[in-house]
Amino acid sequence: METTQLVKGVLDLAVLAVVAAQEGYGYDVVRRLRAAGLQDVGEASVYGTLRRLYTAGALTSWVVPSDEGPHRKYYGINAKGRDTLEEQAKTWQNFSTTMDGLLDRVYDTPTTSGSSR
Amino acid sequence: MNDDTSILGHGDTRVLDADHRAAAQVRDYVSAVRRQLQDLDPEDLDDLTSGMHADLAELLAERGGRLEAILGSPARYAAELRSAAGIPERSSPLPRALDLAAIRRGATERLMRVRSRWPWVDPTWAFIVTLRPAWWVLRGIALSAILRWFMSDVVGELLPANAFEWVVAGMLVVASVWWARRPARSRPAVLFTLAANIVALFVLLAVLSMSAPRDYSAPAPSWNQNGLYLDGNEIRNIYGYDADGKRLTDVRLFDDQGHPVVPYPVDFAGTDVAARVDRFGTSWNNVFPRPWLAGLAPWVFTSSAEDAWTPPWIPPQVIAPLAPPTVPPSPSPSASASSSPSASASGSPTTAPSATRSATTPSTGSAKPTSAPATSAKPTTSR
């Protein structure tokens, strides 16, 4: 299965989690997502997601002027964003547990402790 | 961020130069992406791309090379940004002059809606389609007509006049039907058919418009009865002179049937001519001369500069007096044959002397208007 498709589904959650850990600008968020292991995440997808979460009221945004170069746009999480994050995290955990259970039955014990995920 | 400071920290001109090139590359890429998002609200667009320069510059500094190699084309980037940000895709990829496919799609959709709303559209259309062979025949005839119009001076007749023309028309009809039934349809052939159809349509419209006046020419005279005509020209006014050659005022005229002589009741300026009233309250439209323009007295031709109307003819104050009627019957009609005098001449012996400029006579004249011309006509012939 292609990871890109999976990432797309959870990108909101991933971005919210990263920004909740620490506020950041677009490329910074991309870098941290990749560092966390989501190699396939696309720049434009992250920027778009940041933008959409901001429009939805889950993020705050501010511009930091720079003397040497172009301005940076920072995003930070707010109360609504934290609520959303919590809710989505719960949904993900439920989903993840369900999937684990499903796969456990197929592969028995060895897979659960070991490989893919 | 460390990369950032390290780059800026370098004093090396080569690095600065590379930095400059990178900035230009980022600028180009951002503006290309913005072009793809031009359907957005300008404010939204600025908002969406406000941090892009800095982010892309950092990305480029970190990875090197070309932005297109890292991120894909600006169009792809914009599409990804759009879908992630939940911005609807633009209907046409780029502002193109004419998207024929979209127009056709739109027309088809509209047609489908029409068909579903009005159930009679489909059967009606099917019926019209069955009439197509009739159009093929008509088209052949129309094309033969235009051929004929070019060959001869007679224009406007749809149907052939002689055997040869019928043969030509028949051949064109056959050609038209054959052409329509051909199975292969190339693009030029379709265009040719379209052109032929348009020409045929114009021919038929021309025939219709040219035959229309001919059809109305019969009822036209009945409409003309509203006016008075002399040799096909409309008579608007009549100026009478008595035997002395002096102007006559307030003369009422009747024809040989006893009908009042009434020209079209509108003066040159288009104003309705007011009728005159006799002492019994009967109104008369046959009083001459009529005022040249509304509001003017009879025989007055200088309108007070309200309009620049000039009368086609200003009647003289006086014309030559008639010679006494020595040989009564023949000379007076022949001498006065030009216009009104024939009528006034017969009436002049009785009315003219007293009626020249006064309005007193009408009362006496009105008592016997219908019979008067008839009775006066009889004496002249009997004499």
Image (cartoon, coloured by chain):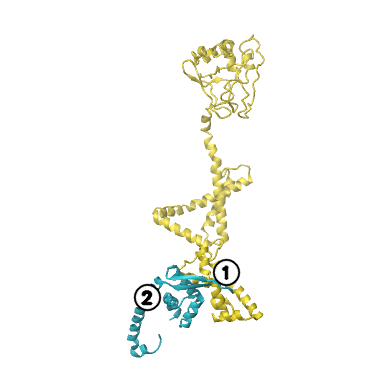
Instruction: Give the letter of the cyan chain.
Output: A
Q: Position of residue B146 (x, y in %)?
A: 59, 47
The residue that mark 2 highlights is A86
| Amino acid type at image mark 2 | Glu
Q: Quadrant of the C terminus of chain A?
A: bottom left
Q: Quadrant of the N terminus of chain A?
A: bottom left
Instruction: Give the letter of the yellow chain.
Output: B
The image's mark for residue B31 is 1
- For residue B128, above or below residue B338: below
Q: Quadrant of residue B34?
A: bottom right
- For residue B380, above or below residue B156: above
Q: Quadrant of residue B378?
A: top right
| Amino acid type at image mark 1 | Ser
Q: Position of residue A19 (x, y in %)?
A: 45, 76
Residue sitting at x 56%, y 58%: B191
State left or right for residue B49 relative to residue B24: left
Q: Position of residue A11 (x, y in %)?
A: 43, 76
For marks 1 and 2, give the one nearer the viewer.
Answer: 2
Decide: few, some or many residues near mark 2? Use Cα within 10 Å; few <14, some 14-19, many ≥20.
Answer: some
- For residue B256, above or below residue A111: above
- The Cα atoms of the two marked residues, 1 and 2, are separated by 37 Å
- Residue nearer the viewer, A60 or B374: A60
Residue extending farthest to the bottom is: A110
